[in-house]
Image (tube, coloured by chain):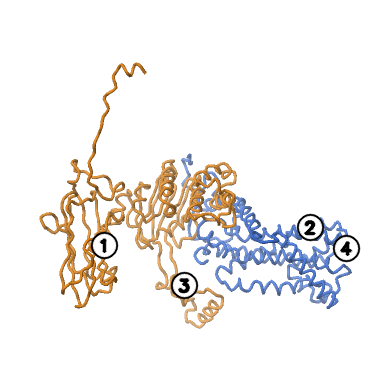
Amino acid sequence: MPVGKDYSMSVSESELQATKPQPIADISVIRIEPSRSWLSVGLKELWAYRELLYFLVWRDVKVRYKQTVIGIGWTILQPLTTMVIFTMVFSNFAKIPSDGLPYPVFAYTALLPWNLFAGALNRCTISLVGSANLITKVYFPRLIVPASATISGIIDFAIAFVFLLVIMLWFHIVPTWGAIALPIFLFLTLITVLAVGLWLSALNVRYRDVGHAIPFLIQIWMFLSPVAYSVNLVPEKWRLLYSLNPMVGVIEGFRWALLGKESPDFKLIAVSTAVVVAILLGGLVYFKQIERTFADVV
Amino acid sequence: MSNIVIRVENLSKQYKIGAAKHRHDTLRDHLADSFKSLFRRDGRRSSVSDPEDTIWALKGVSFEVKHGEAMGFVGHNGAGKSTLLKILSRITEPTAGFAEIYGRVSSLLEVGTGFHAELTGRENIYLSGVILGMKKAEINRKFDEIVSFAEIEKFIDTPVKRYSSGMYVRLAFAVAAHLETEILLVDEVLAVGDVEFQKKCLGKMGEVAKQGRTVLFVSHSMATVLNLCSRAILLRSGRLMYDGPAESTIKNHLAYHSSKIAQAFDNNPERSGNGVVRLVSARILNEINQATSHLVAGRPASFEFRYKNTTRERRGTNILFTIYNQLGVAVSCFDFSLSYGLVEQLGSGGGFTCHIPNLPLPIGQYYIVIKLEVNGEEADFVPHALVFNVDNSNFFKSGQTPQLRFCTSLIQHTWTQEREPELEPSVTRAQ
């Protein structure tokens, strides 16, 4: 087994830091010491571990519906029942307007990103604690754990999305050119999950309260997002404050892209995006800072 | 200088321990504690840097490992062996000091890291392999080898939750054994599976070391360390006590037992038992009844134990002791009751002597553990009660005995040889 023979021992500390996250490279130097800098996210290292990310996502998806009777049917059944109930309660009883669209489509289009968000955020929050057996036994960039929990939601989303096309066909709605922008909003949903999930998953390692609070939090969050109702119902003067919720931009974007509802307030989407980026950066810093204690605390 | 693959300097790790009142497992506790600290004069949180609440699991450990070395770590529970491996695996971070590792590292701190019960054997090979640091292409290449090493060909597409525990462990080890990194950190994962498979695992680990890869190995089993490692480090209470050839490190580790012998019967914190009957002394006698700690294999020896009885109505007493060799392996147990039943009368004191006509122990160092039982309960238990050496042998004609790693005790035996006549030159030619 040829291991390089002349390692340069006169590498400066900054160079060591730079080469540190490269366990896959042929010759790598790993320096283990109490960490001082907490601002390096280690993108290079994440890239080196991309196969692990892929396999963790694959495992999540593979295992999720094992030993269930209707299996993958759950991915459709869930938004479908919610849609039916929403239609009954909000449209038939409460007579909430749906911007001139058939209410079921109106609701289902929002439930798509919402379910992706809620499911992924829930998994993301408990992901680190759930992977305690890995975290205490083997090294890898810990960011991969919440990241894989987030990404694994896409499969469910994709299946539920196909069903949306069926519903749209049923109501004779043709997707507009705006649908091209859909991946952007999908990406924004995932980034939102990751941004909030980084905070919550790291906090959950230390304080298990977070795990208990998350279903509750998600429920409240749903009512603060335009899932069952339209943004137009929110008074104009509260709009800006309202759009601090990143899911407002996402859901508006989905409705615009798919149903061709009047072009969305891009100001709202911009505010939502800015909020997400801020939470994400903060989350990354916090996560990296306490990442090194996970194995001792979890 | 150039062939050093691991350099550890002054590595220390501090843990906060116990002290339940300072643990912040729920947010409420944390908030309450932070709130309290507002009113404390120095305003610092009480849990930080309070020396009574912390423990140095590792303190100022330095060493270097050369390329291709097989290095063992020995020490008692809590000596810091596992903490050291965890730091080197980058699972946890040191509090002070640093370590540098040149090359790819993989760590095997348990069997079956990353296994998922719902997935099949095939799927788990990939999952676990990638988690341990293999590339998918690498696993593809080694897949068949892993499966045949684990001997589970037939069950490769069965979920591992249906596996027997033996199959599970075999598969898990097989994946780990096929890692190709230059540096392997291994923590006692070998102590699994049935005996046959253990042997296979040990063989594989030995192979790994011979291939010129660097192996760091933590184990309780002195015999395994001696088998696998050329060099070993002794840790005690987080400090490096000895660093040298495996054999001398193990001797050092066991010398620690001997240092405790002087106080085996007074103030021995490891001693336990209800104390209705107490041992007061133990000594070893040679064939001319002299007290000694040096014996000769193949010659008579006696072990004498004196006791004091504190009350009258004690019944059913038994005494037994076990001889351990310097690798910590139990050689044999000498149990009074197995030959003579329980003793009914003890008197106020007295002694038991165990006679061994021709000591069947290979040359080496030994220690004994004594236990006194009264009515089935442990009355006195003295670990490391005595240490003795077998220096010479009269057992075989040569005066030598096999090495300890191949032999725990000597058995009287004879050999015969039968010989067929030498081949005739003509016969050889005819063939």
Chain identifier, orange in the render: B
**Quarter residue B348 falls in:** bottom left
Given the image, what chain letter belongs to the residue carrying mark 2? A
User: Is residue A12 at least partly visible in the picture?
Assistant: no
What residue sits 80% from the left and 63% below the top?
A: A253
Q: Is residue B390 left or right of residue A212?
A: left
Q: Nearer the viewer, mark 1 or mark 3?
A: 1
The residue labelled by disc 1 is B369
Chain identifier, blue in the render: A
The residue labelled by disc 2 is A162
Labels 2 and 4: the sequence-earlier one: 2
Whole-number angstrom distance, CA of label 1 to CA of label 3: 42 Å
Q: Are marks 2 and 1 in contact (CB under 8 Å)?
A: no
* Label 2 Cα crowd, 10 Å radius (few <14 / some 14-19 / many 20+): few
* Label 4 Cα crowd, 10 Å radius (few <14 / some 14-19 / many 20+): few
Whole-number angstrom distance, CA of label 2 to CA of label 4: 15 Å
Q: Is residue B352 left or right of residue A190?
A: left
Labels 1 and 3: the sequence-earlier one: 3
Q: Nearer the viewer, residue B213 or B346?
A: B346
Q: Residue B48 — which label?
A: 3
Q: Report whether mark 2 lies on the same chain as mark 3.
A: no
